[in-house]
Amino acid sequence: MTNSSEATAFNNSRKLVRDAAGNYHLVFETDGEICYEKLTGTGALSEFRRLSSGDGSNKYPCLAEHSGKLYVVWQRKTGTNTYDLKYRRFSGSAWDGIQTINGATAITSANALLPAIALSKPATDFEMMVIYRSSAGLRAKRSTNAAESNWPGLSEIAVTNNTNARNPSLIYRRDDDVPTHRFHVTWDQGSDIYHQSYNGTLNSWTAAADISTDPFASSNQYSSYAISANNDRHVVWQALEAEVYFRQVIYHNRNLGNAVAMLVSNNYDQLRPSITGHTGGAATAVCQDNSGGQNIRKRRYNGTSWEGSAAGTIIASNGADVSLAIANPPGAASLALWRSAGSAPHALIVGPAGGLSKSSSEEDLVYHRRIAYFWDDSTNLMLQIDAFQIVAGESQNSLAFPEISVDSLLSSDLAATVSLSGVVLPANTDSLAFTLHLSSRNAGQLRRDDHLTAGVAFEISSAETGLPVANIALPSLAATGTTKQSVRLVFPLQAWRGQKITLAPKFSNLDLAKAGGALVHVYEAVEDAAQKARAAAAALLAPLPASFSVNVHPNPFNPATRIQFHLPTAGLVTVQVYDVYGRMVRELSRDWRQAGTHQITWDGRNQHGRAVASGTYFTHVASGEERKVVKMTLMR
């Protein structure tokens, strides 16, 4: 039990670790003192100990483990805007005395220090680092001595001089490409999440990089950083998504790229996540949500994607300030630590009892895809597609989004991630449909020509001829201010059953090559079957052709070509082929056809099925009073 509502707060600094024997070790604060307890592999609590000296005002402990030894750091407030940073080690058999990392000179800060600690892997040379907030920005100290006894004598290393930097989360990871980069930190600053790496040879940090790449999320904060056994990086944080969902959501960035995942619910906010790495590239994340009170929810990343169904579950109710255990090196098992919600005294819980595989409340995850382009914080464009669907009668079958390598994703690749290529339409297809969420801010900055409007359309083309089949244009983007649209696009395709089509966005008067870009994998929690009906967007139907027209492709051709014709109204249509002497070679069709786009193939044979000679031919298409003739060249 604890009387402190912040006993497990600020999960960027770890409070629970798992050792190689399967024991868990936790640190927490109560009544201004820092305490330790051990949870054995059999579930028994033992070895309770007060780690601080009984002088009060101690808070925010963090913990790391290395080869059976424990390393604990916490802050103690000594006066108005002054702090000491305390350190204590368990040698494997006994606890060493308390050290003051900053020595006799207090650390000045108008805010809590919120320290974090990280240690090297057992298989490497020993290193440890402590990072904390000060009035001058984030600062760090590094030691290569497992029994360090002279913290005050170690140099203080500047991480960032930005005094708005807060909530650091620290890991050890020896980079394969830059072996000198061994410690890595994330923090929130303003509305963004930043990342830096420490160069042990130069004893300095790299330039800070913003990794919160979705420009349509704000208030990015409370990052948690971990690595999995294959050395993949995993960073999760909390942000406000106010374009489609209007909720606090969880973002996940793997390996610091411009592709991120967003875990979102329409029914509840998700707050203050914590993440731990597992074997392979797997990871588990937990967070607090406010569905029916305060719950602890977990989800699992399998190394490729976030799992659905039972992967997103409530593992505890009436909980807050959850933190996941980490193992050094990462392993398959893990538990979480949280406190009970409500008024003090608070229970401290390590669990769940059945492990993180326990599922007390299942949820489904549905996948959507978002692409975002941004010029700066105030100029951006976003397209989100919920799912591509083939509609046949009352049934709707979803199509898979194209696969793409996120490790080498460029801005120029983004449009391809929301396109379809070479889709064969089933014989009973009525239409292709999808719900689109579009948002832009000050899109005029992205225009090629300031005198023309900018716009977005989606176009379906024949995969074989490349000729357009249907096009839906969205209203023009506002040059200044905000444009927002949620609409269901419907492309009637009965005339193209059994044929192969492509679908792609078309950008008019937009110079997206000069913009940054991000791919966002959206995993939306669906708690009940009725929820999806909430977003019944107005439908836009692909317009019927405004005029009668005919195209032939390829031309010249060998051995066959496609004759495509557009009908503004329904009617009887004849399609015939003539030679240069005006003799009918073949009648390809005489059918009643609905308004829309149609196509028919001529295989270079006459009415008797014999191949005709190379030369010039004419296709004659007639419907009602309309007539069109197009010259074709057959080259054998």
Image (spheres, rainbow, N blue to C red):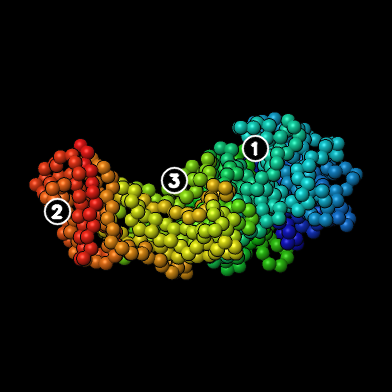
Q: What distance separates the C-alpha of mark 2 from that of mark 3?
A: 43 Å
Q: Position of residue 414 (x, y in %)?
A: 49, 48
Report which quarter residue 470 is drawn in: bottom left
Q: Position of residue 367 (x, y in %)?
A: 47, 55
Q: Write down the residue under mark 3.
A: 403
Asked if one can make out residue 26 in the rendered structure from this viewpoint, the answer is no
Return the disc, 3 or 1, that comes first in the chain's sequence. 1
Q: What distance separates the C-alpha of mark 3 from that of mark 1?
A: 29 Å
- Residue at 39% x, 51% y: name it: 420
SS for tag 3? loop
Q: Write down the residue under mark 2.
A: 587
Closer to the eye: label 3 or 1: 3
Q: Amino acid at mark 2?
A: Glu
If the image is split into quadrants, where does the N terminus sit? bottom right
SS for tag 1? loop
From the viewer's side, name the closer residue of 633 and 235.
Answer: 633
Whether tag 2 and tag 1 are in contact, CB under 8 A, the answer is no
